[in-house]
Amino acid sequence: MAVASSETRVPTTPSFRLDGKRALVTGASRGLGRAIAIAFAEAGAEVVLAARAKDEMDATVAAIAGRGLPRAVAVALDVTDRAAVRRVVAGAGPFDILLNNAGTNIREPFLEAQDASIDALLDLNVRAAVTVAQAVAQGMVAAGKAGAIINLSSVNGHVAGVNRSVYTATKHAIEGLTKAMAVELGPHGIRVNAICPTFIETPLTAGLLGDEAFLTRMVRAIPLGRIGQVEDVMGAAVFLASPAAALINGASLLIDGGMTCL
């Protein structure tokens, strides 16, 4: 296949917009899910927010509508309920974009990790993530749609964390899942990537970051010298969902201020 010379072809900057796209965001009631749902809407996408706390999502939907942005709707969904996930995705899809964000963390020393904690982390962070991704990808393929799936991972998908052994295991699983999905879904035009934030100031991290000693240690561990804000992740998610990332597949985008460089 002939390739145009860079001296004769005038390139055009790809769009970072998501106009005309439909996005599903899980775990969208608060924190990163809520922020990225807003970011997708601001970039032009129609957004379906999914989580258990519908009242909180309804407030976000109202805020999006108040800005005159494309339509957003909220759907009550427990992503650990496989049948419910498949029903909601089939009813609201097909989608062009998935932010596979629902997840949690339970901090316990490995030697003291409780069976219930292990089961809860694996159930939500891994099994539910697989179920959601599979349902959305099946809808994309059936509709003949190319698309972008973004799995919410963590720096703990790359490095270990004290009192976070099981959580770290789940995020390493998401990293492996992302790469395997990228290989299998790439031929269908579906790109799969992961976002890996450091500590971001959200309701999930509020308890930890409220501990001054812990906060000081974390800030010292981040070369940029600060904890992340949701805005630090919003742009990255829009980028990976957009045509500007058209050849990015199977990648993990670390948003950690250099934390994993040390």
Image: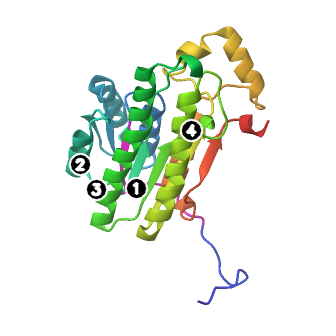
Rendered position, 81 above or below 109: below
Front position in the image: 109 or 233: 109
Q: Which amino acid does label 2 sit on?
A: Ala
Q: Residue furthest bottom?
A: 2
- Closer to viewer: mark 4 or mark 1: 4
Question: Is disc 4 surrounded by few (<14), some (14 to 19) or many (20+) residues within 10 Å?
Answer: many
Q: Which amino acid does label 3 sit on?
A: Pro
Earlier residue among tags 1 and 2: 1
The label number, if any, that marks residue 92 in the structure image: 2
User: In whole angstroms, how far apart are the C-alphas of marks 4 and 1?
Assistant: 20 Å
Residue at x-position 53% and y-position 30%:
167
Earlier residue among tags 4 and 3: 3
- Closer to viewer: mark 1 or mark 2: 2
Q: Name the residue under label 4.
A: 233
Magenta-drawn segment = 13-26
Q: Mark 1 points at which residue?
A: 19
